[in-house]
Image (tube, grey):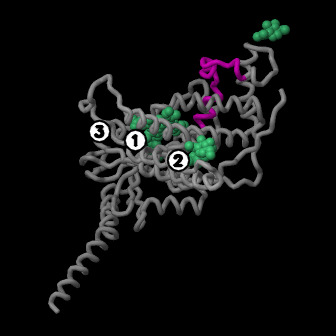
Amino acid sequence: MSLMIFDSIIILFGIIIIIYKFLLYPKIRLIQKKRKYGDKIKVIHHFGPGLLVEYKKSYIQNKDSLSFLRQMANQNGNNIQAYTFNIGTSVGYSFVDPDLIKLVHQNHEAFQKIDVSQAIAYLFLNLCYLQQVKASRSRANSQENLSTMMKLKTIFHQSKIFAQKSPIGQAKSCNEITIEEIIDNFCALFIAGTDTTGNMTGAALYFLSLNPKIQEEAREEVMQIIKQKTNSSDLKELYNCLQFEDLAKLDLINSIFKESLRLDPPASGVLPRISKQDIKIGQFEVKKGDLVNTHFIYNQSNPKVFINQGQINPYRWMKGKEQANVFNFTPFPQGPRNCIGQHLAMIEGKSILINFLLNFDIIPIPQKEVKYETKVIYELQPDELVYFRKRNN
Ligand code: HEM
Ligand SMILES: *[C@@H]1O[C@H](CO)[C@@H](O)[C@H](O)[C@H]1NC(C)=O
Ligand SMILES: *[C@@H]1O[C@H](CO)[C@@H](O)[C@H](O)[C@H]1NC(C)=O
Ligand SMILES: *[C@@H]1O[C@H](CO)[C@@H](O)[C@H](O)[C@H]1NC(C)=O
Ligand SMILES: CC(=O)N[C@H]1CO[C@H](CO)[C@@H](O)[C@@H]1O
């Protein structure tokens, strides 16, 4: 009998602890922060998945997972520097003020990037795997195909894509590189470089389809350079006469990508970090174990920073017109852990776009409902947003 009471007490305690940990603790901490920092901070709290609920709500209500952030930036007279959120039982900050973003990125040693390789491998490989299984039903050497996929899966799961780089002291020797490191680096470059660049270019094509005048000027900008090199009218030859150095002369096309990255950055912030120590970012006290992010998309849609922020206007970037503070536009972040592929991304994007401009008119699809969704990448939905009509120069 007394044993049953004892059991019940333990169960009761368990329930209380769960209620405290999951329901009360995050809420209490977020309320404390609001008290402390007042108007400088915005609280986003939901039980359970927390911030992810806000993304979903924004997506359903405004067809944009990040409309809550854009709205924060557009509210008149605000001076929000960060928002604070929970994800399950964890709480964290996302900094939106460029000066604070700078502090986070410069103090990168204080934070541990979360290891997203498992999530990416899961998303990425399950897709391949399913297609492979489907295809294998009608094929003879399906067994071989499957084992190739399984091997790939193992490699992905073992590699530490995006994980903290090992300290220099631990390197075995300067001129030694292992197969694992080569595979790791391949995976990192492949995954970090493919859908990001694809989505940037896709968004630029979409924005150009809506702005035929800018599109024509961009085409003209390329033709000006080509005309100095050839009199040919063969489209392939026109494209092939362009050289690497020519890409740097394309001010408008460069600006189109910048504007597209401003309005629809494939990465709206960095990957969430976990704080390795207590640290102050501006006046905000970050506790060891807190999540930390920098959502630079905030000032990219801030009307005080970019006039008519909602409109695509590549001309605002032209002739080296840069914003006074480079931290107002950081689609490839700043600091020691910024994007190592940013120049390659622009080279690829420009090469693809030029090829499309020469060969096709880019036309919008009427009545297409366009949405902005945060998955792994912040992307335009659906995938097919424009028509291509063959040009015959
Ligand atoms: C438009 C295209 C791209 C965008 C918007 C983009 C954006 C970003 C962002 C936001 C980060 C920081 C992530 C973080 O700190 O959590 C990053 C890091 C990185 N990017 Fe890119 N990226 C692009 C293209 C590429 C390409 C083409 C490559 C390689 C071929 C690449 C390789 C990397 C790598 C290796 C890192 C990690 C650097 C480090 O942690 O030190 N990216 N990128
Ligand atoms: C970025 O936005 C914040 C909030 O509106 C503003 O206070 C700040 O001045 C902006 N940053 C810059 C460098 O203009
Ligand atoms: C954008 O990225 C997603 C993956 O997050 C991919 O499925 C989609 O095809 C990409 N879109 C473009 C236009 O590259
Ligand atoms: C194009 O044709 C014009 C006139 O025939 C000629 O003067 C010019 O050199 C040609 N340009 C090139 C790049 O071949
Ligand atoms: C990844 C892989 O091994 N794919 C193979 C699957 O099977 C077909 C033939 O049935 C091959 O052509 C593929 O190379």
Q: Is mark 2 within 8 Å of ligand 3?
A: yes
User: Residue at 51% across / 56% down in the picture?
Assistant: 68
Residue 325 in sight here:
no
Quarter containing ligand 5?
top right
Residue assigned mark 1: 162
For label 2, the crowd category at 10 Å Cα-Cα, with few meaning under 14, some 14 to 19 and many 20 or more, is: some
Which is nearer the eye, 299 or 188?
Answer: 188
Q: Amino acid at mark 1?
A: Phe
Which mark is nearer the camera, 1 or 2? 1
Which is nearer the eye, 181 or 242?
Answer: 181
Q: Are marks 2 and 3 in contact (CB under 8 Å)?
A: no
Compared to 386, does 242 lie above or below? Answer: above
Going from the N terminus, do you reach mark 1 or mark 3 first?
3
Q: What are the residue bounds of the magenta stretch?
A: 239-259
Look at the image and say whether residue 256 sits in the magenta stretch: yes
Q: Is residue 344 left or right of residue 1?
A: right
User: Residue at 31% across / 70% down in the picture?
Assistant: 24
Q: Amino acid at mark 2?
A: Ile
| Badge number at residue 219 | none
Q: Amino acid at mark 3?
A: Glu
Q: Find residue 235 and report its horizontal and vertical position in percent.
A: 78, 25
Q: Find residue 46 and report its horizontal and vertical position in percent.
A: 42, 66
Q: Find residue 58 and report its horizontal and vertical position in percent.
A: 54, 60
Q: Is mark 1 within 8 Å of ligand 1?
A: yes
Q: Circle 1 sits in a helix, a strand or a loop, which is it?
A: loop
For label 3, the crowd category at 10 Å Cα-Cα, with few meaning under 14, some 14 to 19 and many 20 or more, is: some
Going from the N terminus, do you reach mark 2 or mark 3 first?
3
Which mark is nearer the camera, 2 or 3? 2
| Spatial separation of the CA atoms under disc 2 and disc 3 | 25 Å
Residue assigned mark 2: 377
